[in-house]
Image: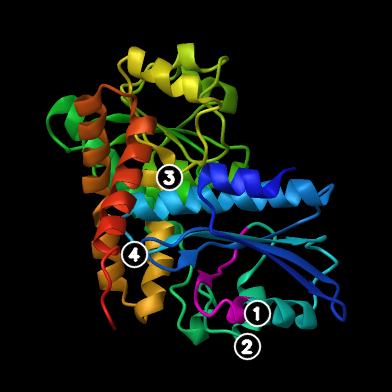
Amino acid sequence: MKIFEYMEKYGYEQLVFCHDKTSGLRAIIAIHDTTLGPALGGTRMWNYENEDDAILDVLRLARGMTYKAAAAGLNLGGGKAVIIGDAKKDKSEEMWRAFGRFVQSLNGRYITAEDVGTTVQDMDLVNLETDYVTGVSASSGSSGNPSPKTAFGVYRGMQAAVNEVWGTDDIGGKVVAVQGVGNVGYYLCKHLHDAGAKLVVCDINQEALERAVQEFGAEVVDPEEIYDVNCDIFAPCALGAIINDKTIQRLKCKVIAGSANNMLAEDRHGDMLQEMGIIYAPDYVINAGGLMNVADELKGYNEERALEKISTIYDNIARVIAISKRDNIPTYKAADRMAEERIEKIGRVHSSFVRR
């Protein structure tokens, strides 16, 4: 691939290749945009087929983090790291410490965290060499399991979408179809149950389903039937790309709001939802609670302050809907526009020299 052409086209700042002979470390760190602040993004360990796949993945993921942080109202930019290797057998203390030293060498331009194929214990080893890491173990000042915080953010975003459709953000009496009741889905169901919603759920994990039935009185349907449920709100909390050609015409909801990433199989499905009159809460805006929570660790974690910030996802979704109506565009485009407008405005503020 033509790396510099790609970086120029999408506005990347830096791509760092990291190699350590002793540990066998092969890592790539991408920094997309630091207009709003240092680039924050997790480290993914994956056995990529080739180096081009790894480069493309880290670039794509870093850019996504820029938009997510900007839309969340955080003073952070977007970055990501990938380590090429098998997460089950290629890890070692020396590898993580070598990686930590490369993160440290960037002098705070990039802050890492756990991601696919990496764990809290891995981040603790990185932390031995650098302070530019979040998501470490609780004994090191971490905020713990992010799932409850992500779920709270999804619930707040859902309230904003409900307010747009029904003129009130009261979810009591609404039928919510929740796809996936694992970590985030479970905590979301708890908020919805407490608010008086009627739950229809599906999951491939029988234990998770039984817990939802016992604790929330949920009705269970087959995973393939969840798209046909006559509901007010559809909450995808599992796989991505579930709004696609096969499912979109089957939906009987007025709102789509969940924690799953990349819900739209293609952008055109977002266009179709707008034509169908369904309010879609863009995934990276509504599921940013975990990111907001981890970002609070950078200031010395305070749960009350973090929850206060996560609660603003309500305002962020309301703003996305307002931009969608203002510019007559689907909400997924409005989310990008909201993020881009914030980066542009803060960029202008930062353009004048101030000695600090």
Residues under labels 1 and 4: Cα distance?
23 Å
The residues colored magenta run 103-115
Mark 2 belongs to which amino acid? Answer: Leu
Mark 3 belongs to which amino acid? Answer: Tyr
Indicate left or right for 24 with 356 as reference: right
According to the image, label 2 marks what residue? 128
Give the vertical position of 84 relative to 59 (above or below): below
Check disc 3: other Cα within 10 Å, few if <14, some if 14-19, many if 20+.
many
Mark 1 belongs to which amino acid? Answer: Gly
What numbered label is drawn on residue 75?
A: 4
What numbered label is drawn on residue 299?
A: none
Badge 2 element: loop
Q: Position of residue 158 (x, y in %)?
A: 29, 39
Within the magenta stretch, is there residue 106?
Answer: yes
| Residue at image coords 53%, 59% | 13
According to the image, label 3 marks what residue? 284
Mark 2–mark 3 contact, CB under 8 Å?
Answer: no
Q: Quadrant of residue 1?
A: top right
Residues under labels 1 and 2: Cα distance?
7 Å
Badge 4 element: loop
Q: Position of residue 243 (x, y in %)?
A: 51, 24
